[in-house]
Amino acid sequence: MQNRLALVFILITVMLDAIGIGLIAPVMPDLLEHVTNSSLSNAAIWGGVLTTAFAVMQFVCGPTVGNLSDRFGRRPILLISLAFMAGNYLLMALATSVWVLLIGRILSGIASATQSTASAYIADISAPDQRAKNFGYIGAGFGVGFTLGPMIGGMLATIDIRAPFYAAALMASANFILGVLVLPETVTDLIRRPFTWARGNPLASFRAIGQLQGVKRLLIIYLIYSVAFWVYPSVWSYYGKAQFGWDTWMVGLSLAFYGFCMIVVQATMIAPATKRFGEHRSALLGMLIDLCTYIFYGFITSSFWAIAITPITVLGGLVMPSLQSIMSQATPDNAQGELQGVLSSLNAVAMILSPLVMTATFSAFTAPDAAIHLPGAPFLLSAVLLVVCVAIHVARPRATAPALPLG
């Protein structure tokens, strides 16, 4: 019963965190156009810079945070993260300069551990054969947040472009208070691992986790896949405006529909898929679906079909829970936080590379003097990356050794 209540709380935590992110997504292009006093194309570049600044800090601090959670517990790390997130949203709400927005994203990136620490928490309370399903629940919780967040954000943006940021700050503050009241700790003395700065830096953590049998190849796939997947948060708002003439309300609705479909997949299809096909084949199936949909979005010009294809697009959601489950089962209990910190850092690397590359690609193909007008060019680039992921995955070794304790 206690594990079930803990799982429910973590899902609420992830959901509220996603609501905060979803609230501000539809309004970011307009806010950046306002504070930079420039065009949509230039605003997209600044959007990439802000996301990259966040990611650099997350890359540097992710393994440190993961190792700290293995030593001091998940509860304090989650609560500190939520407090910083609330402050960041408030700072962005009050910002009148793009440089203030940049400072806010840097501070947020330093303390942003909600997703990775929540995943480590899930690993703590889940049996090995239940981890893929429970990681899928995290995705579902995130999907609920993205269903509600963009809709609320789109409506609030019609009142004032800064209103979604105030709302996000309130959400994060409420989540922090809830965590103080009800969140139990899962790290016990039996699995607590001493913290050392030599082990807490990104390169050392990558080396330690990468030594586990079969994990290094999966980390490479995880990184390349994340770079490709980040095309959605990097350019979707800009892509929708340029390709279909969407306003903030329509962008919000499209994201909300995506979130709703993701809820269905993550909550109901992960467990049956991994049970029927296994984690490896489920991941491959998701990659192939992503490859097809990236090509589709690269060339589609119909707003209707862009929305209609969404239920198929989200089937790519099989990939991440399957990969996480495989790696988590290959990692000892006293290093689950470190693993999630490494995955957080890899995702941060993707957040560094992908927004810069994808927004630059979008800008190059949508600028007034562009030789070819192709807003979907970033999705075609992601399709190429998915081909690489599939090639590496199908060449995987067939045997994986059991996890050994890490000192």
Image (spheres, rainbow, N blue to C red):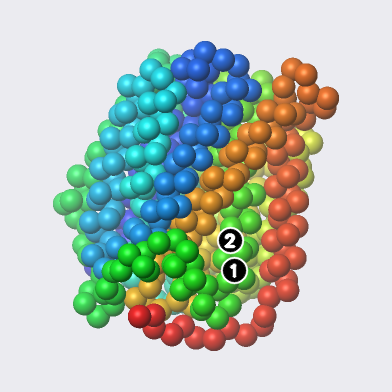
On screen, 158 above or below 290?
A: above
Q: Secondary structure at mark 2?
A: helix
Q: What amino acid type is highlighted by mark number 2?
A: Tyr
On screen, 18 above or below 303?
A: below
Q: Nearer the viewer, residue 281 or 119?
A: 119
In this rendering, position of residue 87 left or right of residue 360: left
- Name the residue beneath numbered marker 2: 222
Residue at image coords 65%, 30%:
239
Mark 2 and mark 1 residues within 8 Å of each other at the beta carbon: yes
On screen, 208 above or below 62?
A: below
Residue 200: image location, x then y, percent: 36, 64
In this rendering, position of residue 343 left or right of residue 313: left
Residue 376: image location, x then y, percent: 73, 35
CA neighbours of label 2 inside 10 A, class few (<14), some (14 to 19), many (20+) = many
Q: Nearer the viewer, residue 97 or 83?
A: 97
On screen, 121 above or below 35?
A: below
In this rendering, position of residue 216 left or right of residue 135: right
In this rendering, position of residue 111 left or right of residue 209: left
- Name the residue beneath numbered marker 1: 218
Residue at image coords 25%, 49%:
80
Residue 131: image location, x then y, percent: 45, 70
The N terminus sits in image quarter = bottom left
Quadrant of residue 305 in the image?
Answer: top right
Q: What amino acid type is highlighted by mark number 1?
A: Leu
Q: Which mark is residue 118?
A: none
